Amino acid sequence: MSSPADAFTRPALPRGAGLTLDSAELRVLDMPIRFAFETSFGVMRRRYVPLLTLRAGGLEGHAEGVMDHLPLYREETVPGAVAFLEGQLLPRVLGRSLANPEALAQLLAPYRGNRMARAMVEMAFWDLWAKHLDLPLWQLLGGVRPAVPVGVSLGIQRSAEATAELATAHAEQGYQRIKLKIKPGWDEVPVAAVRAALPDLQLTVDANSAYTLADTAALQALDAYRLRYIEQPLAFDDLVDHAALQPLLRTPLCLDESITSVHDARKALTLGAARVINLKVARVGGHLEARHIHDLTLAFGVPMWCGGMVETGVGRAHNIHLSTLPNFCLPGDTSSASRYWDHDIIHEPLEVQGGLMPVPEGPGIGVTLNPAVLDRVTRHRLTVQAGAVPHVDDRPDQPPPDEVY
Ligand code: OSB
Ligand code: MG
């Protein structure tokens, strides 16, 4: 039986001479955010950012992890990711000759879940490989636009008036869509205030899984405000209840937390659990999985957009490159880096101009680390060299050793 997904196939990636990874550096950064960012699951004042650098033949590739210190968004955590990277993922990939990101993906495939940690390795490798080929990442990914449409995600404010003021200020800065964080008891009031202030604005809400089907009436009340979509109202790992909710609403549902893979996305679209997808490349395991999801949504005729996790310039650059693919047709969350950071860890400013984020130029992700800032915010730093032995040597491609633990 054929599915819409079969209609779209990609040519294989080019195979170069092969890159052999010599070493990796993993840092954990402490990055204070310029304001308190409140969502239904907590108030974020800083991010502990795991930053991975992969090295091969004098080149470097970078990526950051989007897991939080605590498992409040999804299950992964910074300490868990650091242990998994140091003890297993990095020893497994270093020293291998890898023809392209598909070869790397094969090494990472046996591990279940942990997609944010896997994405760090995968995305750093894409940056490195693109630099090795002397091409910008967007071109290797198959991008089609020189700048990407963006919106902004606004946290829960003290009052409806404060929300409307903040939304108006951001609309004046050119953001093409405004997303309001909501939670039970704080939904219709701020939405009504913003809609009254900005009648023509593309407006959305994001509940970060704070509602249940018992709250259907509160969500139906939002139908009156011409929202483009309601993002992730129900549980972070749910598809079935979202599918039950969608026919009860006029407003499309958009899934964020629930989509960790192309398999989730296929099930969600088949069930009717979402009519819009928020894709975060660093949540789904990296750019290859992100492209599979992109191609799937295109085949299903479902619009998508690129989400954010309050990234530094490194993660932001990856998101921008990915957002150049054709079906990222709704404004994403990659707002100006200067909204969040007084001192970003990269040299290049990533600033929105007229509602568009320009794609960084140059090979790879097109941004460079600022060592002075980086060293100041680094709290932990470790390196792993080719030849390091996994802490638990039960590599899935080899017969288990006699003594595993
Ligand atoms: O649900 O999209 C989300 C930030 C942290 C965790 C989850 C989310 C968000 C955002 C902010 O909405 C997006 C951004 O500006 O990077
Ligand atoms: Mg979200």
Image (cartoon, rainbow, N blue to C red):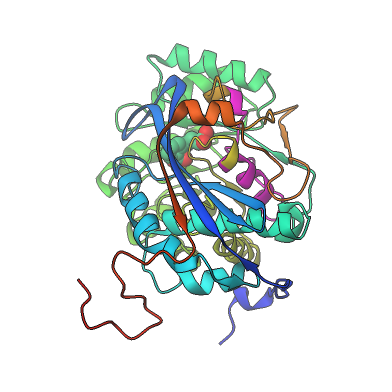
Q: What stretch is highlighted in magenta?
A: 315-338
- Please give left or right for residue 109 compared with residue 129 in the image: left
Question: x%, y% of residue 313?
Answer: 59, 35
Q: Does the magenta stretch include residue 323?
A: yes
Magenta stretch contains residue 64: no
- For the point 64% across and 40% down, the residue is 331
Which residue is rendered at x = 59% and y = 66% of the image? 292
Can you tell which quarter of the image residue 92 is in?
A: bottom left
Camera sees residue 335: yes
- In this picture, residue 16 sits left or right of residue 30: right
* Image location (x, y in percent) of residue 42: 31, 31
Q: Which residue is drawn at 68% across and 76% down?
A: 7
The quadrant of the image that shows the N terminus is bottom right
Up the image or down, 405 lies above or below 309; here it is below
Where in the figure is residue 70, as x and y percent of width and height? 29, 41
340 versus 13 height, above or below: above
Q: Residue shown at 28%/46% (left/top)?
A: 212
